[in-house]
Amino acid sequence: MNIRLKPEDEQFIQAQIARGKYENPEDVISKALRLLDEWEKGYQNWVEETRQKVEVAAEQLERGEGIEGEVVVERLREKLRQARENQR
């Protein structure tokens, strides 16, 4: 298979090789593909977990076990704040 890379992608690959972390472009691309596969699997797990949580929440709402909207929004804001801090 032959592929064309953008110049910036080629530079990135060459930089990784120059750092000594990889021996050749194939190693860099192989690692990138493994990471993409891991990310895809993680994303699919997240989708399934979220779907299950939504089902549980819908059932709770049907039973009248809901939470005030302001509380939900505040909890979401706190989770976003924590996620941003963890990315730093």
Image: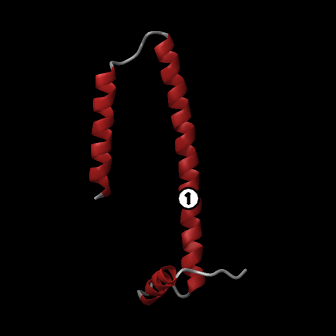
Picture quadrant of residue 38: bottom right
Left or right of residue 80, residue 65 in this image: right
Left or right of residue 52, residue 85 in this image: left
Picture quadrant of residue 71: top left
Q: How many marks?
A: 1
Residue in the picture at 55% in, 33% down: 51
* Residue 48 to residue 84: above or below: above
* Residue 13 horizontal/vertical position (percent): 50, 82
* Residue 78 horizontal/vertical position (percent): 27, 38
* Residue 26 to residue 44: above or below: below
Which element carries disc 1, helix, strand or loop? Answer: helix
Quadrant of the image containing the C terminus: bottom left
Residue with the most extreme right position: 1
* Residue 16 horizontal/vertical position (percent): 45, 83
The coloring applied to the image is secondary structure
Residue with the most extreme bottom position: 18
Residue in the picture at 47% in, 16% down: 60
Instruction: Say what amino acid the circle numbered 1 marks.
Output: Glu
Residue placed under numbered mark 1 in the picture: 38
Residue in the picture at 51% in, 28% down: 54
Left or right of residue 77, residue 40 in this image: right
Quadrant of the image containing the N terminus: bottom right
Picture quadrant of residue 64: top left
- Bin the neighbour count of mark 1 within 10 Å (Cα to Cα): few under 14, some 14-19, many 20 and up: few
Residue in the picture at 32% in, 56% down: 87
* Residue 5 to residue 47: above or below: below
* Residue 50 horizontal/vertical position (percent): 51, 36
